[in-house]
Amino acid sequence: MARDPDTIEREIEQAREALAGALDELSERANPQRLADQGKEIAAEKWADPKIKYAVIAAGTLIGLLVLRKLLK
C-alpha cells in the first residue's frame, strides 16, 4: 500500500515538531540554574520550619562544644 508523499512529509514534520517540543521540555527541566534555584527554594522552606531550624542549631552547638572540649583536653 503506497502512501501519498504529501502525507509522509506531513507525518515527518509532525514527528519533528513533537521531538523538538520534547527536547525543549527536557532541556528546561535539566537546566542547572533552574535546578539550583529549586534546591535553594526547598532548603529555604525546610529552614523556615522551626523544628528543623532549632534541631540543626542544637546539633551544631553540640558538635562545637564537643570539638572545643576535645581541643582543651
Image (cartoon, helix red, strand yellow):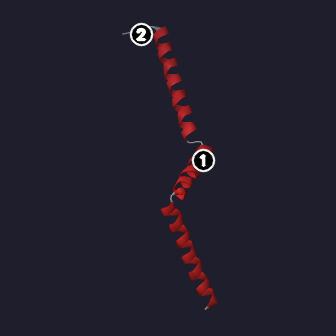
Question: Residue 7 at what x, y percent from top left?
Answer: 46, 10
What's the residue type where badge 1 is placed? Asp
Q: Is residue 47 above or below residue 22?
A: below
For image coordinates 40% across by 9% down, the residue present is 2
Q: CA distance from mark 1 to mark 2?
A: 49 Å
What's the residue type where badge 2 is placed? Arg
Q: Nearer the viewer, residue 56 or 70?
A: 56
Residue placed under numbered mark 1 in the picture: 37
Q: Is residue 2 above or below residue 38?
A: above
For image coordinates 53% across by 34% down, the residue present is 25
The N terminus sits in image quarter: top left
Q: Residues within 10 Å of mark 1 (few under 14, many from 20)?
A: few
Helix or strand or loop: what does disc 2 sit on?
Answer: loop
For image coordinates 55% across by 27% down, the residue present is 20
Q: Residues within 10 Å of mark 2 (few under 14, many from 20)?
A: few
Q: Furthest-front residue in view?
A: 50
Helix or strand or loop: what does disc 1 sit on?
Answer: helix
* Foreground disc of the pair 1, 2: 1
Residue placed under numbered mark 2 in the picture: 3
Residue 44 falls in which quadrant of the image?
A: bottom right
Question: Residue 39 at what x, y percent from top left?
Answer: 56, 51
Residue 72 falls in which quadrant of the image?
A: bottom right
Q: Is residue 59 above or below residue 38?
A: below
